Image: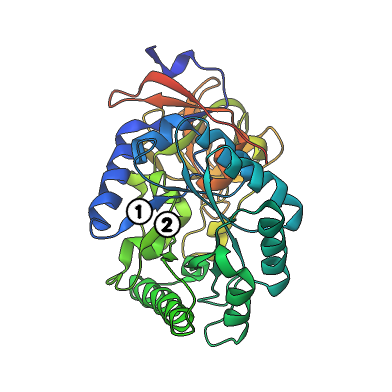
Amino acid sequence: MTSILGGLETPALVMDRVRLDRNLARMRTKLAGVRLRPHVKTAKSLDVVKRAVTPGSGGITVSTLKEAEQFFAVGYRDILYAVGIAPNKLDHVAALRAKGCDLTIILDSLEAARAVADKSGAAESVVPALIEIDSDGHRAGVKPGDARLLEIGRALGKNLRGVMTHAGGSYDCKSVEDIRAMAERERAAVVRCSGELRAAGLPCDIVSVGSSPTATYAESFDGVTEVRAGVYMFFDLFMAGIAVCAVDDIALSVLTSVIGHQPEKGWIITDAGWMALSRDRGTAGQKVDQGYGLVCDVRGQPLGELIVSGANQEHGIISARGGMPLDGARMAQFPIGTLLRILPNHACATAPQHDGYHVVNEAHEIEARWPRFSGW
């Protein structure tokens, strides 16, 4: 289908296909010497993911078992569920594996490892697991040098497949040099742990790292078997704020309509509030605070210093960055009904607010609608 953006009811999620494909190609080139296992948690759409990896030709990473189900159903077999396993999900994992899904889980505790071993023993099958390594103190995982690494590996027994880590701390980096250092820290942590497991006679076929910042700037993947990244497909203002991408690389935006003015406050009111944009304010801690999103014209070009400075459930408030009110002449440039596009702070938070992508081409005409799903 082809139509102009003016044919859409707002708010609506818009995908710039040219930018998406460019982002995908850039990461493929960067990781030409190591396996890329794309993270599909943001996309949650077959139409998006098949542009990153053809079904059956490579592995993917998921954050929910629903994602595993949906993508397995269309031909993706090699799937890593990259959230620490809860014992109440092991029946679901076993059911997917019984259907032919090569689903791998992760864990970082002796208790979880024993639960996995008990489940696989009872079913007389294998539930492959990676031990999560804490490479940066950011979230979960076993720290390098912790004696629990070998204890967990031994408890897993035949289920042990390797190690993984996620350098989420890269999101807090202040420079490209910091990201490069974080990437090396990430790599060194899992390579060290893989060596300790092998030295103890335990298997470690997979050594997995990944975040979009470290994947972009890493200088070495020696000892690594695969790299995971996800938001690189779309990028967002947060990634632009730490120099992982340019604003012109951001493929996702929310189409909104001007529905009112508040001259005494210097505000333009739109119909895209936090239900359409999300509550994410991740750029507030960066050098440039983008509010709830950067305001662009209908063709996706930023409009100077205009940002969504405030948001209610269904209303967005546009003003200049820093809360500066707009004068009457500036507001008059955006009469009621004007279409604008808002670039998101965090694509992973904005995309789930919508049930599909309105895909636009070079001429900013809609050429397709790609459905997406949600839930666990």
- Check disc 2: other Cα within 10 Å, few if <14, some if 14-19, many if 20+: many
Residue 368, given in percent of the width and then of the height, sits at 41, 19
Residue 185, given in percent of the width and then of the height, sits at 41, 78
- Check disc 1: other Cα within 10 Å, few if <14, some if 14-19, many if 20+: many
Q: Amino acid at mark 2?
A: Arg
Residue 189 image label: none
Residue 122, given in percent of the width and then of the height, sits at 72, 55
Give the residue displayed 71% in from the left and 50% down from the top: 89
Give the residue displayed 56% in from the left and 34% down from the top: 70
2 or 1: tag closer to the N-terminus: 1
Secondary structure beneath disc 2?
strand
Observer-nearest of 186 and 318: 186
Give the residue displayed 31% in from the left and 69% down from the top: 221
Q: Tags 2 and 1 in contact by the CB under 8 Å rule?
A: yes
- Residue position marked by numbered label 1 in the rendering: 36
Observer-nearest of 197 and 44: 197
Residue 144: tell me if it is visible: yes
Q: Is residue 171 left or right of residue 64?
A: left
Picture quarter with the N terminus: top left
- Residue position marked by numbered label 2 in the rendering: 228
Secondary structure beneath disc 1?
strand
Query: Relative to 354, is 284 above or below?
Result: below
Query: Relative to 229, is 98 above or below?
Result: above
Residue 324, given in percent of the width and then of the height, sits at 55, 50
Quarter of the view holding residue 208: bottom left
Q: Amino acid at mark 1?
A: Leu
Query: Relative to 320, is 171 above or below?
Result: below
Q: Is residue 110 left or right of residue 79?
A: right
